[in-house]
Image (tube, rainbow, N blue to C red):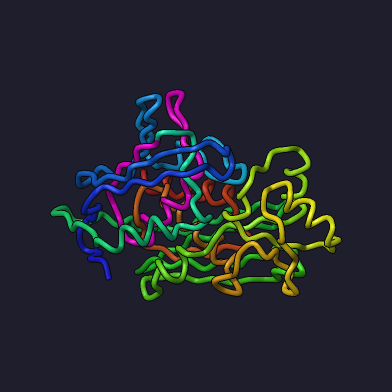
Amino acid sequence: MPNYMKQQTLKKEYKFEGKGLHTGAYSRICIKPAAPGSGISFISVEKGVEIPALAENVSNTARCTLLSKDGASVSTVEHLMSVFAGLGIDNAIVEVDGPEIPILDGSARYYAEAIVKDGLQVQGAKRRYYEMKESVELRHEPTGSWVLVEPADHFSIHVTSDFNSRVLGVQKAHWDNSVDYVSQIAVCRTFVFFHDVQHLVSMGLVKGGDVDNAIVVVERPVAPEVVAEMAEKIGRPGLTVLPSGYLSNIKLNFLDECGRHKLLDLMGDMMLCGGHIRARISAYKPGHTINTDTAKAVQAILSL
């Protein structure tokens, strides 16, 4: 278990590259150790701008979390931020050569596994835990989503995901320091519904191999010839719909993998409040908008 009494950073640099899930653009990133007290920052190599990983810098939450400052932006930061939260990393610099963090396999697995293999560098400065003095609750009436942050002695997060889906049903996920983040949360991949992919393919927006980065849920009945046609268009002939209601592009790590991924995202988004907090976070149908709005509300309280 990490030493939660002192601040922690990386022992060395880590480089990753690949395409972005949403932009489709190729990016290279380098995750570097950082000095005590510096927090987490993303640096746009193209613009030469440092963007602190704070909720106040969130500029868009359409399908991912995008940070912006002084004309520079970095999108899909939530998976990497989740790794920093789950492994107990306080300080790091992420240099990004491209518009988006590489999606890799759609999870946080490769980032987390690389860092855990080498361990973390314990720093001399004490960690400043953010203590919640009062509860914060945000609700989004149109969707029924809510997030509740309550004072607690330790950090924990509890998510209920209701996708109104016959395939997914209602999924619950939980994390605290007793749960191994790398094997139980970080490996959980993002997901998409087949009809959404089908629409994107018809618009010419999905390129070959994209289904390698996501669990595809086939919520509505689809004729085999429709699946075959789409599979050909994205360069993946032979895909079928499994009896479980998922496309055969990948196998699930857990039956509730989609719900666990929503927890992964929430962990990353809440890290944007500025660091590690002592709180119990409960959420129903969380998403990037309500997640980051909650992080902003918590950040505002903590700055008082």
- Label total for image: 0
**In this view of the protein, which residue sits in the foreground, 223 or 270?**
223
Q: Nearer the viewer, residue 72 or 129?
A: 72
| Residue 201 position within the rendered picture, expressed as x and y whole percent measured from the top left | 74, 44
Instruction: Write the residue at 61% across / 64% down.
Output: 250
Residue 255 in the image, given as x and y percentages of width and height: 61, 74
Does 17 sit above or below residue 166? above
Image height of 298 relative to 4, above or below: above
Please identify the quadrant where the N terminus is shown.
bottom left
Q: Which residues are magenta?
A: 67-96
Taking the magenta stretch, the answer to whether it contains residue 75 is: yes
The residue lying at 45 percent from left, 66 percent from top is 280
Give coordinates of residue 13: x percent, y percent.
26, 47
Identity of the residue drawn at 25% across and 42% down: 38
Residue located farthest toward the left when viewing the structure as drawn: 124
Image coordinates of residue 65 in percent, x first then y, are 52, 44
Q: Residue 137: within the magenta?
A: no
| Image side of residue 107 versus residue 34, left or right | right
**Picture quarter with the C terminus:** top left
- Residue 259 vs 237, above or below: the answer is below
Q: Is 66 on the left-hand or right-hand side of 169?
A: left
The quarter of the displayed image where residue 283 is located: bottom right
